[in-house]
Image: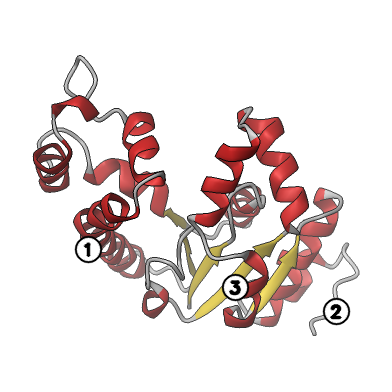
Amino acid sequence: MIIGLTGGIASGKSTVSNMVKDEGIPVIDADIVAREVVQIGEEAYEKIVSYFGIEVTNSDGTLDRKKLGAIVFNDEEKRLALNEIVHPLIRNRMENKVGELIEKGYKTIVLDIPLLFESKLTNLVDKIILVYVDEDLQRKRLQNRDQFSDEEVEVRLKAQFPLKEKIKWADEVIHNHGLLSDTKEQLLTILIKWNCLPAHKHSAHTIIPK
């Protein structure tokens, strides 16, 4: 089973991703793949520099991701252009990584994709888990974590579909407002329900599959 794990900025998806890894289930992280495909010499790197100019690179030639991010977050046309460059290459590399893991005998693989719906990558997965927090908590976490101004927070939230909209597209939702132990229990319940984990493995938890 290929599971898509998604959420929104500052929803706590990375925390849940680490919990999945703790259970011995391999995770392919779209953010890591995105960094791989824009390395110097890669096709996406050449296209990005050609489109955006040398000013989006550092002195050593590598991409200045922060500067590029600032440009695309404030310009819809340029954001779409960047997506058209990188998304097909990210998709191909993720599919290759899935193939390698299947060959190694893994029965469950998780694709950690923050923009699963926005990037139209849902056809890569069989089931979807959404990590959900309400928008007020998202704002607070963003401001505390990244020291963003109110304006910067709004720009980043508007670049993604609202989490409350994503609920209707998810197979399961993890509500990440409370204790980490609560979050983990929700995750384990889902994985056991989908036969991704043996129920007896976590008999210490009082988990009843829904």
Instruction: Name the one closer to the observer, 18 or 139.
Output: 139
Q: Residue furthest right?
A: 206
Q: Residue 208 shows which numbered tag? A: 2
Among the 4 quarters of the image, the one containing residue 129: bottom right
Amino acid type at image mark 2: Ile
Give me the residue at 28% from left, 68% from top.
99
Give the Cα separation between the discs numbered 2 and 3: 25 Å
Q: Which mark is in front, 3 or 1?
A: 3
In primary-sequence order, the first of circles 2 and 3 is: 3
In primary-sequence order, the first of circles 2 and 1 is: 1
**Percent of width and height locating residue 208:** 85, 79
Q: Is residue 147 above or below residue 152?
A: above
Among the 4 quarters of the image, the one containing residue 28: bottom left
Amino acid type at image mark 1: Pro
Q: Residues within 10 Å of mark 3 (few under 14, many from 20)?
A: some
Q: Which residue is mark 3?
A: 166
Q: Residue 88 shows which numbered tag? A: 1
Q: What secondary structure is marked by label 2?
A: loop
The reply to whether residue 62 is in sight is no
**Percent of width and height locating residue 147:** 64, 27
**Percent of width and height locating residue 55:** 20, 25
Q: Residues within 10 Å of mark 2 (few under 14, many from 20)?
A: few
Give the Cα separation between the discs numbered 3 and 1: 22 Å
Q: How many marks?
A: 3
**Percent of width and height locating residue 205:** 87, 64
Q: Is residue 104 left or right of residue 135?
A: left
Q: Residues within 10 Å of mark 1 (few under 14, many from 20)?
A: some
Q: Residue 35 shows which numbered tag? A: none
Of the 4 image quadrants, the one containing the C terminus is bottom right
Among the 4 quarters of the image, the one containing residue 183: bottom right
